[in-house]
């Protein structure tokens, strides 16, 4: 086989936001104007306690 390329691990970037986290959805809403989280809202409330 030929030479292999090493890809950058984007999860190590200082501005990385885990996908589908509360912060990710807030950023998505800011960027596109509005986003409503369709998951179980009780899960978000439990994390804030």
Image (cartoon, rainbow, N blue to C red):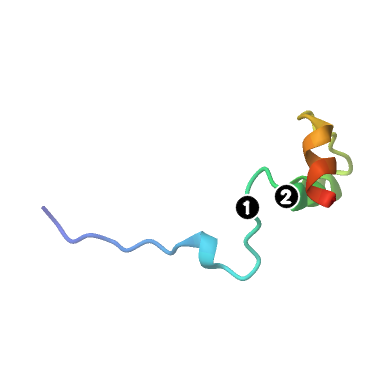
- Alpha-carbon neighbours of circle 1 within 10 Å: few (<14), some, or many (≥20)? few
Q: x%, y% of residue 45?
A: 85, 42
Q: x%, y% of residue 13?
A: 57, 68
Circle 1 sits in a helix, a strand or a loop, which is it?
loop
Q: Residue furthest front?
A: 49
Quick check: marks 1 and 2 in contact, CB under 8 Å?
Answer: yes
Residue at x-position 18% and y-position 61%: 3
36 lies left or right of 10: right
Residue at x-position 77% and y-position 37%: 43
Q: How many marks?
A: 2
Q: x%, y% of residue 41?
A: 83, 33
Look at mark 1 in the image and give the residue it sits on: 18
13 lies left or right of 49: left
Residue at x-position 83% and y-position 34%: 42
Look at mark 2 in the image and give the residue it sits on: 24
Circle 2 sits in a helix, a strand or a loop, which is it?
helix
How far apart marks 1 and 2 lie (CA) works out to 7 Å
> Foreground: 20 or 40?
40
8 over 47 or under it: above or below:
below
24 over 13 or under it: above or below:
above
Which mark, residue 43?
Answer: none
């Amino acid at each position: 086989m030929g030479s292999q390329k090493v890809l950058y691990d984007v999860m190590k970037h200082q501005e990385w936001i885990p996908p589908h986290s509360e912060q990710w959805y807030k950023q998505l809403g800011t960027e596109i104007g509005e986003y409503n989280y369709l998951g179980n809202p009780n899960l978000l409330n439990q994390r804030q306690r």
